[in-house]
Image (cartoon, helix red, strand yellow):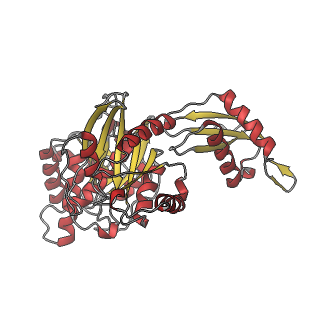
Amino acid sequence: MSKPLIAIVGRPNVGKSTLFNKLAGARISIVEDTPGVTRDRVYYECEWRAKTVMLVDTGGIEPYSTDKILSQMRRQAQLAIDSADVIILVTDIQSGVTATDQDVAVMLQKSGKPVVLAVNKCDRLGDVPPDFYEFYNLGLGDPIAVSSVHGHGTGDLLDACYAHIDFNRADEYGEEYVKVAVIGKPNVGKSSLVNRVAGEERSIVSDMAGTTRDAVDTVVENEYGRFVFIDTAGIRRKSRVEEQIERYSVLRAYMAVDRSDVCVIMIDATVGFTEQDSKIAGYAHERGKGCIVAVNKWDAIEKDGKTMQTFRKKLETDFSFMSYAPILFISAMTGQRIDKLFEQIQYVNSQNAMRISTGRLNDMLSVATARVQPPTDKGKRLRIYFCTQAATRPPTFVFFCNNSELFHFSYQRYLENQIRETFGLSGTPIRIVVRERGDKKR
């Protein structure tokens, strides 16, 4: 199930980005007193009450401005509003209710989405200023006093947002379906692949980049299992993303990755690996998804006896940061090795969800530490007491030791390789967490 989306909107310079950073717990958006600094949507996860939502920060809305940049920001904000589950309207206690606030409130009421009104810059604790009650005139219910600088009232704000979100809603597809996001640059054949596996033309196919604007779900059931293929718009370099609709498409592509169990990263065999391919793959890797590198248009390559081997070695170097991902050479046009792709998707999905018992992990740990002794520093040796698996998707392992500073990255990589050598875990990233004995951090 995709994470609920909360959009933070309002007129310029009311503190939307500061509030976004406070809720996200990190400095993500640029904060400046000059209106119009945030010109695009910024997205980040927020966890509250053990539940995770996606926050989206937007540029200030000037409903009737003719300025080119402000009008683009207004369109961007509208796109965020259209895709949001809940909207936070941020206002400013110092300037009171303005005509722009009233216009934005009317626009949000027309959207039909739940709206939570936040009155920002209430920096003093205690009773709210008398001007606070003026914001009831916006007709959006009870306003909530917050301080985006100090964090006052942010818990109440999130509680009000959560009241409009059904976290128990069932996924649109059952657990028996493997959700597969088909990602890559524009015009590498993503829609052609989805059409091939579906056996019909579900997506528009064209040589013109940018044909697919939205994420499209295609349910496929065959002898290999049940799948949901999510065809996404191509992800371009940010400098190339000029059209407003295409920026929205990039958001949907990233959200499709978040929804998926397995990501098929498509490469154009006629073009080869590019820097943008690594960024797309890097996002799937960071999200802990099972990954498969599919080299499409293999039928268009002139081959000799070593073409595939040479191409594979180069890709292994290019994708060295995710060496666990299997590489498959396919043709969406002719159907070459599509059956192998289904088999790989099922295998990678099972690896991403694999759980290993603590006993087996510690047997592996004993052998690994005997083979290569833990590092030492100034006479102090790293001692690893035990290891346990804390989570799946991706498999996450916690190592308890005497001194986390001695647990060098190179030794973590060695243990990761030993885990893969012993238990497989092909096609999925692995997370390693180091804890000192007595450390109560989760």
Number of labels in the image equals 0
Q: Residue at x 53, y 58 (%)?
A: 316
Q: In which quadrant is the C terminus drawn?
A: top right
The residue depicted at 29 percent of the width and 52 percent of the height is 190
Q: Position of residue 313 (x, y in %)?
A: 53, 60
Relative to the observer, which residue lies in front, 1 or 302?
A: 302
User: Is residue 366 left or right of 295 when viewed as pictured?
Assistant: right
Whether residue 253 is visible here, answered yes or no, is: yes
Name the one closer to the observer, 383 or 16: 383
- Which residue is at 13% across, 70% downward? 66
Q: Quadrant of residue 115?
A: top left
Q: Nearer the viewer, residue 303 or 252?
A: 303
Report which quarter residue 388 is drawn in.
top right
Question: Quick one: 394 or 325, which is closer to the camera?
Answer: 325
In the picture, measured across the screen, residue 220 lies left or right of residue 370, that is: left
Q: Residue 311's x, y, as percent? A: 47, 61
Q: Position of residue 236 (x, y in %)?
A: 32, 63
Answer above or below: position of 361 versus 246: above
